[in-house]
Image (spheres, rainbow, N blue to C red):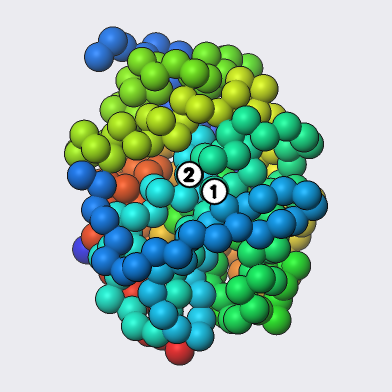
Amino acid sequence: MKFIFNHNYSSALTAKMMRFVAVFLFSMLFLSPASANELSHEIVSESIENHQLSIPYSVSGHGNTAVIFIHGFMDAGNVWEPVISKLHAQDYQFVTLDLPFMGAMSTMQGQVSLETISSAVTGVVDKLDMPVILVGQSMGAQIAELVANARPEKVKGIVFVAPVPLSGLPVSEEFMSSMQAMANNETLQRQFRQQQFSHIDPATLEKIVVNGTQITAKNIVELINAWSKGHPAGSKPALSTAPVLIIGGADDPVCTPEVLTSLVSPRFALETTIFLPEAGHWLHIDHSDDVAKEIDHFLVNIQ
């Protein structure tokens, strides 16, 4: 069962959404002590030189259209493996990458901004030189929209999974401090991640713990500043006219249904918004079957 919504655009956060976010941020301050699926396709790892950066990415599958999976804050490209391994779509190349300042690039120095990160992904789009479909989760959704704005002729469709609005989501100083404390701290990372999932296998948990632990404290703070403050384009109707699928979690405490239906869905001309019951913010990990099914359906419909 899933819920589908379409609403008119509103530029202000609703009071109910703010209460959801406040509860989530408060809970983050009190962390109590406390097998990833393999891809079925051959994987080819490459890199793209963009603004003197080596952007690592991997390609699996075969086809004339690429589906580029863009991870969120404190993650890496490997978090998409559970979804990709369950896709049935044919004639597509599936691309995962590590965004600047995260994953294999966690210790990278330089200006942390949505523009810097999206420019790196745009470089991958240019190197692939084929039509693309962008799939972005959380902060990765902001990046996906900016890439679509930069290469509208290449982007055939966009899937947002638990998207942070391009206009941003304000956070408290307490939230910032709790996140910064997780830098190079596997114990805090593990406690935080365990609290976010109703069920997760140990191998996947360890993978995402490593992803988050290796990011420097400085980059954590600057990444939060980037996604929480957002981009000016987020206050206007979306530039992209490509079909958009928005997949939210009905129980997401961060990007709540209220956030998505007021700040994300109404900005796109051709959008469908669904909410998966009992799913939270990392639904691509603990509800990967459902997310893969929705992406498969989207790919069939835009062919």
Badge number at residue 98? 1
Residue sitting at 51 percent across and 35 percent down? 74
Q: Up-down: is 141 above or below 173? A: below
Residue 1's image quarter?
bottom left
Residue 4's image quarter?
bottom left
Pick the front one: 14 or 86: 86
Disc 1 marks a residue whose amino acid type is: Asp
Mark-to-mark CA distance, 1 and 2: 5 Å
Secondary structure under tag 1 reads loop
Q: Which of marks 1 and 2 is nearer the N terminus?
A: 2
Disc 2 marks a residue whose amino acid type is: Ala
Circle 2 is placed at which residue position?
A: 76
Q: How crowded is mark 1: few (under 14 residues within 10 Å), some or many (20 or more)?
A: many
Q: Specify whether residue 108 is in view.
A: yes
Quadrant showing the C terminus:
bottom left
Would residue 90 be found to the left or right of residue 214 on screen?
Answer: left
Give how far across and how far down residue 87 sits, in percent: 30, 70
